[in-house]
Image: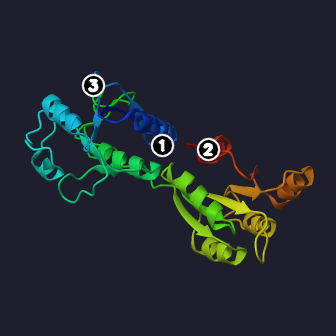
Amino acid sequence: MSDKKTFAVAMIGIPDQERNVLKNIFKLSLYRSYTYTFVSANEPGQILIVDADDSAAMVEWRTLYGTTASESSLSSLSAASPTIPTVMVTKEKFTDQFPHHINRPFVATRVLSILDQVAAKMPSVSQDRIIGGEPSSAVLKEESPAPIALVVDDSSTIRKQIELELKLFSIQVDTAESGEQAFDLLTQKNYDIVFLDVVLPGVDGYQICKTIKKDKAKKKMPVIMLTSKSSPFDRIKGALAGCDTYLTKPVKQSSFQKVVKKYLKL
């Protein structure tokens, strides 16, 4: 994407285990408008993540980045004025003391959401602030509306798993557990992509797919069939229904990401 921007993230006091978790979460940002990459503590970062539960890390943060807070308690953070946008990691719950924080244990969607908030408020997108960005003005471009996906599956676990994966791409998600619910949603919205289980209570996935592909206004909507079967007959039946491709459950994350990237052109 031409407007994709990558931000270097430095860390202070984050334990190795959590640092590795954050690195893996950063990898999930590769297909998003804002991408994050880890840099070592002695390299300049554009965003800083600090362990607020580690008093030594807090002292180092204040020393290196010129913050004015003199106490180690979290309540003193409102007096801090860091020279680099900072995200605090803590087990405690911040209120107004520090606007950008991540609670332990880490949740990928929460981490990326907070980093996106920080990135969006960066005062400049000049080349010395953004790695790999194209020359642009000092104001961030307004992003195009986020894609919208429909996930249809009678398993609440699978619906939630797919929803979480899609949200890592900043995709809005609607869900349905039956064919009837899916039809109701399809009459209300045009979706950018549909994930459709084959076996559903009532109307099955093949019939829903056929209905979508017969609608002139919706026939170009990518339909990804979800099936626990992988026989050639199921492939043929899905092709006859008009589906664009199918994924066999349990779906591998790498396969899922390739499909999302392909059909939404991310």
Q: Badge 1, how many Cα within 10 Å: few under 14, some, many 20+?
A: some
Identify the residue at image location x=54%, y=62%: 173
Quadrant assignment for the C terminus: top right
Q: Label 3 amino acid?
A: Pro
Residue at the spot of label 2: 257
Q: CA distance from mark 1 to mark 2?
A: 12 Å
In percent of width and height, residue 36 lies at 41, 36
**Is 135 or 248 nearer to us in this picture?**
248
Q: On residue 44, which mark appears? A: 3
- Disc 2 + disc 3, Cβ < 8 Å: no
Is 261 situated above or below 233?
A: above
In percent of width and height, residue 126 lies at 27, 31
Is 5 situated above or below 178?
A: above
Q: Badge 3, how many Cα within 10 Å: few under 14, some, many 20+?
A: few
**Is 35 or 207 nearer to us in this picture?**
35
Is 149 situated above or below 39?
A: below
Q: Which circle, 3 or 1, is nearer the viewer? A: 3
Identify the residue at image location x=68%, y=45%: 252
Q: CA distance from mark 2 to mark 3?
A: 31 Å
Q: Label 2 amino acid?
A: Gln
